[in-house]
Image: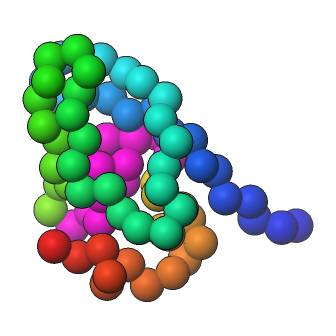
Amino acid sequence: MENSIIFESEITCPKCGYKKIETMPTDSCQWFYECQNCHTLLKPKKGDCCVFCSYGTVKCPIIQAGKDNSCCST
């Protein structure tokens, strides 16, 4: 069975609970995301490479593919 990469994730703002489905970048990690509802600037939690890994329903494509995420470290 082939593992397919999912490119969309529902990101949830931890401050106001607003949810939005976003398309994730395929070749890099997204370090910042502004909530469209309350305008809070989200940053990855400690140990996560991006906002999708911290606040999304699906981990970023780099993590899904099992690639080294050292390029994404802050």
At x 30%, y 17%, the residue is 18
Question: In the rendered image, is residue 17 in sight?
Answer: no
Residue sitting nearer the eye, 46 or 20: 20
- Residue 68: in magenta span: no
Q: Quadrant of the C terminus?
A: bottom left
Residue drawn at the location 14% of the way across and 24% of the way down: 39
The quarter in which the N terminus is drawn is: bottom right
Compared with 43, 68 (above or below) is: below
Is 22 situated above or below 72?
Answer: above
Q: Residue at x 40, y 41 (%)?
A: 56
In this picture, residue 64 sits left or right of residue 55: right
User: Is 70 positioned to the left or the right of 44 in the image?
Assistant: right
Expressed as whole percent of the image width and height from the top left, the position of residue 9 reads 50, 39
Compared with residue 41, is residue 48 higher up or lower down, i.e. above or below? below
Q: Is residue 50 magenta?
A: yes
Instruction: Locate residue 3: give its quadrant.
Output: bottom right
Q: Residue at x 29, y 49 (%)?
A: 51
Asked if residue 15 can be seen in this view, the reply is: yes
**Considering only vertical position in the picture, is 57 above or below 71?**
above
Q: Position of residue 57 (x, y in %)?
A: 46, 39
Q: Position of residue 21 (x, y in %)?
A: 49, 29
Question: What segment carries the magenta color?
Answer: 47-58
Q: Nearer the viewer, residue 63 or 7?
A: 7
